[in-house]
Amino acid sequence: MWKSNVIAWKCHRIALGPIFLGLTFVAYAQDTQLPNKKDSVKFAVIGDNGTGTKAEYEIGKRLAASREKFPFEFVVMMGDNLYGGEAPKDFVEKFEKPYKAVLDGGVKFYASLGNHDDASRQISYEKFNMGGKHYYSFKPKNGVRFFSLDSNYMDKKQLDWLEGELKTSLSDWKIVYFHHPIYSSGEKHGSNVELRSTLEPLMVKYGVDVVLSGHEHFYERIQPQKRIHYFIVGSSGKLRDGNIGKTALTAKGFDRDNAFMLAEITGDQMFFQVISRTGQTVDWGSIRRAEKISKSTDSK
Amino acid sequence: MSTTRVALIAILMAVPANSQRRPDDPAVKDFNDRVQQYWDLHKKIEDKAPPVDKKKEPDPAAIVAHEQALANGIRASRKNAAEGAIFTPAAAKSFVAMIHQALSSGRGDAARGLVLGEGNPKNPKSAAKIDLMVNSKYPPHAPVSTMPPSLLLNLPKLPEGLEYRFVGRNLILYDSKANLIVDILRNAIR
């Protein structure tokens, strides 16, 4: 039987009492609220980040600070990795500098392509780890596989590749990420229904657990749809203040400041924490991986 | 039957049969031949461009140098290429029909919204200056339009690296490896 539940965590510091409430909030805001287990898969999520603006640099610093307490090994990027020009200096100013501390720590970034990205330049760029491809998959550890898609150009070749990859993957956790969200409460864009009608049947059939996207310049956690958990992380550089509309889709939204996400997979649970530019935790919790109806049989 | 096939069949059933890829259409066959000729030229010139590690190049300057050498070589070889050299009048007629039918049936409204929406560089919300000319580069500040899967499934397949994109209502044939506009079909959405 499939199970999917979101568990809000208790913030024990709240119990310290009203006298310390202000101090507690500051400490709480800067803490990492994740289990931080030894053999877990730890990663971060950023999206729509490549602005080269102060906001991107501040998120970069916050990301580095988080890593001191939560040593994530890689970062997945939701696209729009470099806005505007993509000259060599832009790779430096809009990527290498903002995330220098994290890159210097050996963290790998795995990019997907947004509608503002120059694919030919980015797919070959070593630090984006795309291996010269518009879409690819990687397995950071046994039991977890990520699938990075190019939602700008979802042709038959890519769909066939995705089906083949999903079908042959024996990973317990299947996490798919791409730029355009297929569920969204954004007032500017909203759900990409066209893409949904193509991708969702595949993702449901092959037991995708989590879908990560960007494009909308805010953070939104969507109510599970057909047993899949959806997150939008599109405000790590850009921000569309107050753009989350009122819909039944929203489990939690944050559109007042820039943000990024930390996540940890351990066993059948994925814990997540979303942190704003100022260091406040704006969402956190865990999801439980759904039990698969049927397992694939080959050896991937 | 695979999910993809089910989805594809559903999409294709939503579109009248005569709008599909028309493999027997002489105009489409001629288009495919012209695309292949272009791609042969692309590969020949790419072999002479400064080397780059296509899978993991550490130096962005090397990537840019490779792309620009490729684009310059193609421009030089196709300096007399005119609009319609690949989208010939006969091919244009077939493409307009295929696009029209794909965007006016089944999921057509959603697809049309995607093509002409915010991602399109001629949309007022994301307006960007583009000189729509054969052999010109796609400007770095302009977004690329998102191509609806239902439409892509109905257009002739292209070699990897060559793409269809919309700029306003115009369909372009875009060489993404050289960042070059190869041909233009004006007013493709009618």
Image (cartoon, rainbow, N blue to C red):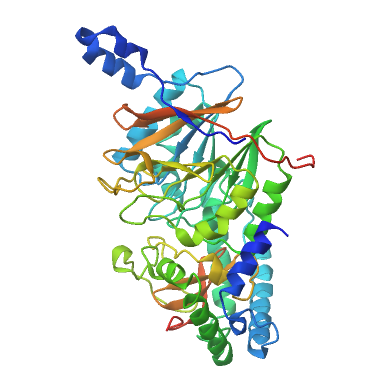
Q: Is residue A11 above or below residue B44?
A: above
Give the residue drawn at x 35%, y 39%: A56
* Farthest-out residue, bottom: B90
Q: Percent x, y for residue B27?
A: 63, 89
Q: Nearer the viewer, residue A7 or B110?
A: A7
* Farthest-out residue, front: A1
On screen, residue A257 versus residue B28, left or right, reads left
Q: Nearer the viewer, residue A108 or A197?
A: A197
Q: Quadrant of the C terminus of chain B?
A: bottom left
State the image quarter where residue B176 is shown: bottom right
Q: Percent x, y for residue A43?
A: 52, 31
State the image quarter where residue B141 is shown: bottom left
Give the residue drawn at x 67%, y 31%: A143
Q: Is residue A238 above or below residue A70?
A: below
Q: Nearer the viewer, residue A201 or B113?
A: A201
* Farthest-out residue, right: A298
Quick check: can you spot residue A148? yes
On screen, residue A11 versus residue A108, left or right, reads left
State the image quarter where residue B120 is shown: bottom left
Q: Nearer the viewer, residue B98 or A286?
A: A286
Question: Count the marks: how many?
Answer: 0
Q: Percent x, y for residue B24?
A: 70, 86
Q: Quadrant of the N terminus of chain B?
A: bottom right
Q: Percent x, y for residue B125?
A: 29, 64
Quick check: can you spot residue A134? no
Q: Is residue B71 above or below residue A287?
A: below
